Image: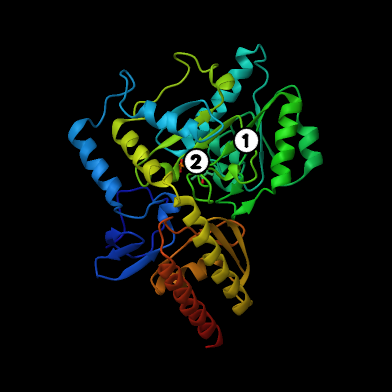
């Protein structure tokens, strides 16, 4: 395959060339088969080549690809209505990515306070280990030094606090605070869940202080955690939310969702996007919801998650030298490793099983939501083979 000489060297892919994909499986150019527990980082929610998505994309391609928001785009009203009918939100702005959905969420919070005559309320409180994207603003929101280094002055207006330090949080809120921003479950940070009572506490604090609660559900959303949105599990609603990854099923699509009262501040001309909400993306987003909102789909996700978690818990018991614990919700799962997580990711890949590393030495397991119970057992068997190989190599 050779090194990709003309692309930025910011990624380090393993030496595999994928040629084809179907359902939960990827095939390389040598015909090797891989079970995909990455789902393109929680993106291919319905697996690869889902017939309804493929047909929808083909049909839309025959009609209209792109219009720009100069014109009313077919599918936007429908997708926005469905997202709102199934959530806290009343208004949606469509983007192409998670970082852009976050940018819109941040702008919406600040603009509301500006419109209320409080232009000084710009600060957004975020938490250690957070990940909100890679734009200049969202690296400031995430606050992680490794992503900020070398890119000039950190964007102003973000206060990064330790995870779970309630006193630090209370004293950080002042007259310049606009919002608290949090992932209900940190994804890149290592599948770190914010306990339900803490989410409730954040909600109460925001109400008391007159500031917004923003959830970043870019990774957790769209049935990944067993409900359409992860915050619907503890039933704590945000004022503003960012969404992306799973909603496009592999087509670049994101959304910023907000309550009516908040969204009205985003008046004509305050925001926009050339590609955001384009007809292809809208068709696919609607097609993803056709499947995910079908009666029984999320029950099936939850049933599969229970089975999957049982297997993972058994593996932690069997390999206490390699694995520490299992975490997550629904099919957003993590296993904390005791050896280097990427070593285990590589060992699993050798067995034809693809997983993703995360912060805190965690291995993320993000199968397509359509994975079958049989394939969950295949995943377990491949993990056993991988962990045995790691043990054998340690003894040698
Ligand atoms: C992936 C991710 C983002 C960024 O999304 P991009 O599409 O890569 O810009 C933001 N927030 C969370 C929680 C994510 O997982």
Q: Residue furthest top?
A: 117
Packing grade of label 1 (10 A; few <14, some 14-19, many >=20) is some
Front residue of this view, candidates 305 and 36: 305
Front residue of this view, candidates 151 and 47: 47
Relative side of 138 to 40, left or right? right
Name the spot of residue 76 as percent of width and height, x first.
Answer: 37, 28
Mark toward the viewer: 2 or 1: 1
Dividing the image into 4 quarters, which one contains the N terminus?
bottom left
Front residue of this view, candidates 271 and 94: 94
| Label 2 vs 1, first from the N-terminus | 2
Q: Quadrant of residue 217?
A: top right
Does ligand 1 reach within 8 Å of label 2's beta carbon? yes
Do labels 2 and 1 touch, CB within 8 Å? no
Name the spot of residue 66 as percent of width and height, x first.
Answer: 26, 29
Relative side of 351 to 340, left or right? left
Name the spot of residue 204 as percent of width and height, x first.
Answer: 74, 33
Does ligand 1 reach within 8 Å of label 1's beta carbon? no
Q: Which disc number belongs to residue 237? A: 1
State the scheme by which the image is colored: rainbow
Residue at 42%, 56% in the rendered image: 368
Name the spot of residue 147 as percent of width and height, x first.
Answer: 55, 45
Q: Which disc number belongs to residue 134? A: 2
Relative side of 112 to 5, left or right? right
Cα–Cα span, label 2 and label 1: 26 Å
Whether residue 11 is visible: no
Q: Residue furthest front?
A: 295
Residue at 44%, 47% in the rendered image: 295
Q: Secondary structure at mark 1?
A: loop
Up the image or down, 87 lies above or below 183; here it is above
């Amino acid at each position: 395959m050779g090194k990709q000489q003309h692309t930025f060297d910011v990624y380090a892919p393993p030496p595999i060339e994928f040629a084809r994909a179907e359902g939960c499986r990827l095939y390389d150019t040598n015909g090797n088969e891989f079970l995909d527990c990455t789902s393109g980082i929680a993106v291919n929610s319905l697996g690869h080549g889902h017939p309804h998505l493929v047909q929808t994309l083909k049909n839309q391609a025959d009609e209209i690809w792109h219009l720009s928001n100069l014109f009313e785009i077919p599918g936007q009203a429908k997708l926005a209505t469905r997202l709102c009918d199934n959530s806290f939100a009343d208004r949606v702005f469509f983007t192409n990515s998670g970082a852009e959905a976050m940018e819109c969420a941040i702008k919406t919070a600040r603009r509301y306070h500006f419109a209320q005559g409080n232009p000084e309320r710009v600060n957004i409180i975020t938490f250690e280990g957070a990940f909100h994207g890679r734009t200049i603003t969202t690296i400031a929101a995430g606050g992680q030094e490794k992503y900020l280094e070398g890119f000039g002055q950190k964007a102003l207006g973000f206060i990064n606090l330790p995870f779970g330090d309630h006193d630090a949080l209370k004293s950080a809120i002042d007259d310049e605070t606009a919002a608290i921003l949090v992932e209900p479950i940190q994804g890149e940070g290592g599948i770190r869940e914010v306990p339900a009572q803490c989410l409730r506490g954040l909600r109460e604090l925001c109400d008391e202080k007159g500031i917004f609660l923003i959830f970043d559900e870019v990774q957790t959303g769209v049935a990944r955690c067993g409900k359409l949105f992860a915050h619907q599990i503890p039933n704590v609603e945000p004022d503003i939310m960012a969404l992306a990854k799973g909603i496009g099923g592999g087509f670049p699509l994101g959304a910023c969702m907000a309550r009516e009262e908040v969204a009205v501040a985003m008046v004509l001309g305050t925001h926009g996007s050339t590609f955001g909400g384009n007809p292809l993306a809208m068709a696919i987003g609607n097609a993803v919801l056709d499947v995910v909102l079908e009666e029984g789909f999320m029950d099936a996700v939850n049933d599969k998650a229970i089975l999957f978690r049982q297997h993972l818990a058994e593996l932690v018991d069997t390999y206490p030298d390699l694995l520490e614990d299992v975490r997550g919700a629904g099919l957003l799962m993590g296993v904390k490793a005791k050896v280097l997580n990427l070593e285990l990711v590589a060992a699993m890949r050798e067995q034809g099983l693809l997983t993703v590393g995360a912060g805190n030495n965690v291995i993320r397991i993000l199968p397509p939501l359509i994975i079958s119970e049989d394939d969950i057992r295949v995943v377990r068997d491949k993990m056993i083979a991988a962990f045995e190989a790691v043990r054998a190599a340690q003894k040698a």
